[in-house]
Amino acid sequence: MGASINWVGLLTIIRREMTRLLRVPIQAFVAPWISALLFIFIFGYVVGGRISQIGGHSYLEFVLPGIVMLNVVNAAFLQSSSQVYFARFMRYVEETLVSPLSYVEMISGVLVTVVFRSVVTALGILVIAALFGASSVAGVGEFVFWVVGVAIVFGLLGNLVGLWANNFEQLTILNVFFITPLSFVGGVFNTIDMLPSWLQWMAWANPFFYFINGLRHSMIGFTEAPELLGIGVTIGLGAVMFVIVWRLYAIGYGLRE
Amino acid sequence: MTPALSISHLRKVYARGTVAVNDLSLDIAAGDFFGLLGPNGAGKSTTIHCITGISTVTSGEIRIFGVDAVKNYREARRRIGLSPQEFNVDTFATCRQILDWMGGYFGMERAERKRRAEMLIEKFDLVPHATKQFRELSGGLKRRVVLARALIHDPDLLILDEPTAGVDVELRMDLWRYLQELNHDGKTILLTSHYLEEIERLCRTIAIVNKGKIVQHGPKNEFFTEPGGLEEAYLRATGATPERIAAAAGR
């Protein structure tokens, strides 16, 4: 085997995590779909019916990418943080620690499940939105990039939190104080120019703005920021997060005694 | 001949400053049945954790069949099977899944995994329990699953950290027989136990650990030169009172 990739080992981590994921389908998939359905119905259909078009699109079409992105972020973060934390908490992470698996294989195994859960969540929301007549995807490749790219970024962030957390409370801190607030002010429900001028700079400093804007562009062609800037931010964040998580695995942070 | 396990000057200090293993050196010859004895907190499990990668090593060197267990950990770990003291299992997984996944981590192809898993399920009398979740099993059955898991990839060095703790007499006897068979077939076995009788019956070489150091080490017969045998040697090596040692010697 040497330094080559342990493909069977990697696939086994993925199989194990898929098995664990599919033990809780209501929590993993049905809950975000119902939440998205309520968002689409209230904000898109009920409230949106009283709001004029934005950039030539109905409010439902405008808000849908944000709803998809909120759920992709949540799915990715929750999947990886709970996956890593529970493996530590129940100590079965030791099965992989004593095996001939590289850190990249361990991290990749987590990320594949994260991407699967995020993509299935996103596709389910598109199907629900189609029932309300709003689920266009203008650029399929671009749509896939944003869903997968953001899932990887938040999968890595969740991995980091899963390594750090020592109790269930700590597992939720980042979601409550960072992810949810930033995603809501990142342009899910409004354009940047709807914000007061003194708040607009914050949107540009908020990575969620680029994620939502990028996905919105891929779905309805509407954008408020240069596409390449958003792609650069996403790839840059992903690369930085990967190096940090890889380093933490290498030193055994949260994993080894 | 390259030792199955070679530890030199191993030191493990935990983050809070506790020195669990202090300059421990040890060689285990290939094919040996090696017993590691010591009181609770002596450093036995920490040493095992350092060998298998569950713990980081503060300093020192560990080699598995000549391969550096830290620098070349992937190659080294392929040759080790570990049955830990505490159950480190996804308790919602079935017995069969636990074996299958462990084989997978070690890169075993599906057909080989299945063959080995079924063989071990039969060997450890787990057939009626193969599709039960781990959490549904009794303590003795859980211990069997963890032992089967340690053997799934047919390791050359088997490390058993108190494998018979909490199991009934019948299983203990079965397990002893099976371990002797494995050793007879050429597997090197490192066993820790609190049962002196177990070490005495199975092992050819014994080391006693106390306060993170090896305090006595040698072939089994060296421990039987005194009247109290292994028990007296153990008590003496671990600093027991003269009264307790005398009581052991008188038995």
Image (cartoon, rainbow, N blue to C red):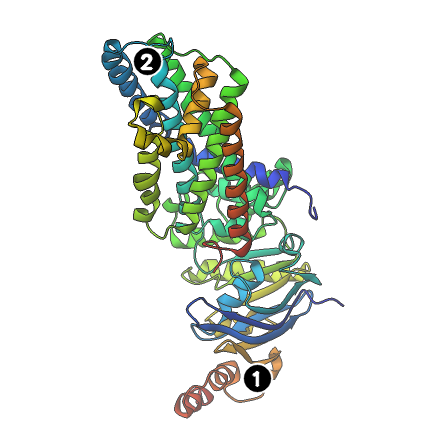
SS class, disc 1: helix
**Mark 2 packing: few (<14 Cα in 10 Å), some, or many (20+)?**
many
Mark 2 — on which chain does it sit?
A
Q: Position of residue A64 (x, y in %)?
A: 36, 18
Residue at 48% over, 49% down: A93
Marks 2/1: CA distance?
85 Å
Q: Position of residue B153 (x, y in %)?
A: 62, 48
In this rendering, the answer to whether B248 lies above or below A173 is below
Say whether mark 1 and mark 2 are on the same chain. Answer: no
In this rendering, the answer to whether B16 lies above or below B250 is above
SS class, disc 2: helix
In this rendering, the answer to whether B104 lies above or below A234 is below
Instruction: Tell me, for residue B224, which label it has, or none.
Output: 1
Residue B128 in sight: no
Query: Does A23 sit left or right of B117 as displayed?
Result: left
Q: Nearer the viewer, residue A83 or A22?
A: A83
**Residue type beneath disc 2:** Leu
Query: Does A212 sit left or right of A47 as displayed?
Result: right
Question: What is the tally of numbered marks visible in this picture?
Answer: 2
According to the picture, the residue beneath numbered tag 2 turns out to be A60
Query: Does B94 sit left or right of B213 as displayed?
Result: left
Image quadrant assignment for residue A124 = top left
Residue at 49% over, 48% down: B125
Residue at 41% over, 46% down: A162
Instruction: Tell me, for residue B97, which label it has, or none.
Output: none
Q: Position of residue A140 (x, y in %)?
A: 52, 16
Residue B159 in sight: yes
Q: Nearer the viewer, residue A20 or A157?
A: A157
**Residue type beneath disc 1:** Phe
**Mark 1 packing: few (<14 Cα in 10 Å), some, or many (20+)?**
some
